Amino acid sequence: MGPDIETLIQKISRLPGLGPRSARRIVIHMIKNRDISLEPLLTSISRVFKNVKVCPICANIDTFDDICSICSDRTRRNDIICVVESVADLWAIERTSCFRGMYHVLGGLLSSIEGRGPEVLMLDKLTQRCNINGVIEIVIALSATVEGQTTDHYIKNFFGNRDIKTTSLAHGIPMGGELDYLDDGTLFAAFSARG
Amino acid sequence: MGPDIETLIQKISRLPGLGPRSARRIVIHMIKNRDISLEPLLTSISRVFKNVKVCPICANIDTFDDICSICSDRTRRNDIICVVESVADLWAIERTSCFRGMYHVLGGLLSSIEGRGPEVLMLDKLTQRCNINGVIEIVIALSATVEGQTTDHYIKNFFGNRDIKTTSLAHGIPMGGELDYLDDGTLFAAFSARG
């Protein structure tokens, strides 16, 4: 195994969810399928490297000139903004097509353990957008983890004395979930929010 | 999500062991870590694409001019050849440093289900090498699966009436393995080969 191959395996094994063994498998697959895997991947990565940017308004990542395709879409409402933790969550919501407003991607969640304070939320940028576009609702779509819920409360508090409604995603039984296997917290939330 | 990103996700999700979800995670990680992940990976893949070839003698993949680093290594014995199924197996054996001979990488194992006949074994190439280098032993290092063992027998048979010793890897209890959890086949093999 030459140094070039070894470097590539090392780099791929550092990607999330992969290790040395899966990286070796992937590299062998790529080299064996040079024309249908290695070359197209190379082109594709270099296109993304050249073209993809972070949107200066919502922090979505996309290929665009000034602002991303969501921020520049005139058919979407710009008076309702959904706050998400990451671009992956933004994509997940977009896949459901249930939301036709704008987004605000946080730089991370509040975490005293990892030393992330309110500055990662970039709420001054969000406030500015609210003032300019006359935003009437902020939908906080964060994970139901301790860090997610702490951040949720912080944002709700932050906008508490302003004329903007802040809502959060509902908690309850996931579709297809069986009562018997649910944790107590979820069952409690589902009961409290019954209707 | 732009078309460039979508294409990249699609391409990555086709790599072995990955799916759409892990591909999305990897792409987001790469874009977020542009300088420490996306760019080095791009350079690394393009180097491999440019430099890596299949060795015309043993079918190892490596960066080289004429023949691979193993075939050109004068400190290795060239009168003993190890037959492996794939380059991944070759790398696994090299990591143990237990073998200092040459290799012969098969194009696949015999499989009547997938329609692979003896031509994938490239035994004429192996025979030629045996004649030129005066090979005295062929070590068949194939998996203990039905296809691996069929191929093992075929190769043994093929060299049966020649003056070359053919050996196979030993079967038995894996290191750290507990007797109680072993399957019957392994236990039987371990008993038969006791010594």
Image: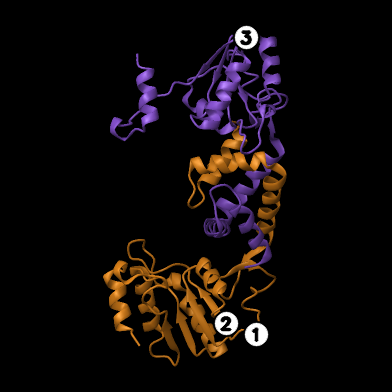
Chain colours: A orange, B purple
Q: Are marks 1 and 2 on the same chain?
A: yes
User: Amino acid under label 1?
Assistant: Thr
Query: Which residue is depicted at the point 49% across and 22% down?
Result: B97
Instruction: Identify which residue, B24 or A128, lies in the foreground.
Output: B24
On the rendered image, what quadrant is the N terminus of chain B found in? bottom right
Q: Is residue B17 left or right of residue A163?
A: right
Tell me whether circle 1 and circle 2 mark residues in contact (CB < 8 Å). yes
Q: Residues within 10 Å of mark 1 (few under 14, many from 20)?
A: few
The quarter of the picture where residue A91 lies is bottom right
Q: x, y (%) of residue A18?
A: 49, 48
Q: Which mark is residue A75?
A: 1
Q: Which residue is mark 2?
A: A100
Total residue callouts: 3
- Is residue B102 in view from this perspective? no
Q: Which residue is mark 3?
A: B161
Query: Which residue is depicted at the point 29% across and 69% down?
Result: A180
Q: Are marks 1 and 3 on the same chain?
A: no
The quarter of the picture where residue B86 lies is top right
Q: Chain of mark 2?
A: A
Q: Distance of mark 1 from mark 2, alpha carbons? A: 8 Å
